[in-house]
Image (cartoon, rainbow, N blue to C red):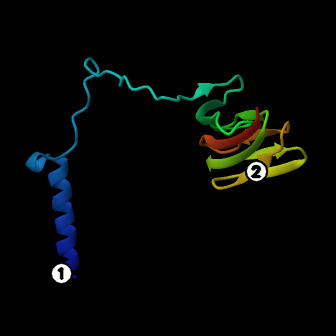
Amino acid sequence: MFLRTCVVTAAAAFTLSCATGGNGTGLLKPADPATAKPSPYQPDRPFVAQNDGAMARPVFRTDTGAPYGADVHDLLVPPGKRTTLSHDGVVVVDTREGAGEAAVGDRQVKLEPGVTFGLSQGQTATVQNSGRAPLVLRLYVVTVR
């Protein structure tokens, strides 16, 4: 009982000292909107909006190894949105984040992190985000050029 009282008292003292700025620590002051500026940072490969509301970005591309080519893309599907996957080559789709469903021909695939599915050359898939967070897919595309 004594040990529990000591621990609770020490935790309360530590919390109060941090909140009140004891010893130069505590909460940061709010930023002044008049002097705050957005960061000039721009990513090398930003997401680009597609017509259906999804966003895509290239991650990797190789032109070596002719006649084959390999591309890697990230696809972000916002909650409630649907997109169609259509590429010239063979595609392996890896679910990175989020939840949803994919319709590949007459087959339904439940999407969650770690789930993969493939598309043959010329095959399409319809992907629906059924979650409350973005659905993030990584597409590995192999083509003959």
> Where's residue 71, x and y in %?
66, 37
Circle 2: element type:
strand
User: Which residue of the protein is positioned furthest toward the bottom in this rendering?
Assistant: 1
Specify the label residue 2 is tagged with.
1
Q: Is residue 33 left or right of residue 55?
A: left
> Where's residue 57, x and y in %?
60, 31
The quadrant holding residue 41 is: top left
Say above or below: 20 vs 87.
below
Mark with earlier residue (1, 2)? 1
User: Which residue of the protein is positioned furthest toward the top in this rendering?
Assistant: 34
Circle 1: element type:
helix
- Residue drawn at x 44%, y 25% is 42
Between 57 and 62, the one lying in front of the other is 62
Q: Amino acid at mark 1?
A: Phe
Between 10 and 139, the one lying in front of the other is 139
Q: Is residue 28 left or right of residue 140?
A: left
Q: In the picture, which quadrant includes the C terminus?
A: top right
Specify the label residue 68 is tagged with.
none
> Where's residue 102, x and y in %?
78, 45
> Where's residue 105, x and y in %?
89, 44
Specify the label residue 117 is tagged with.
2
Q: Is residue 32 left or right of residue 130?
A: left
Q: Is the residue marked by circle 1 packed among few (<14), some (14-19), or many (20+) residues within 10 Å? A: few
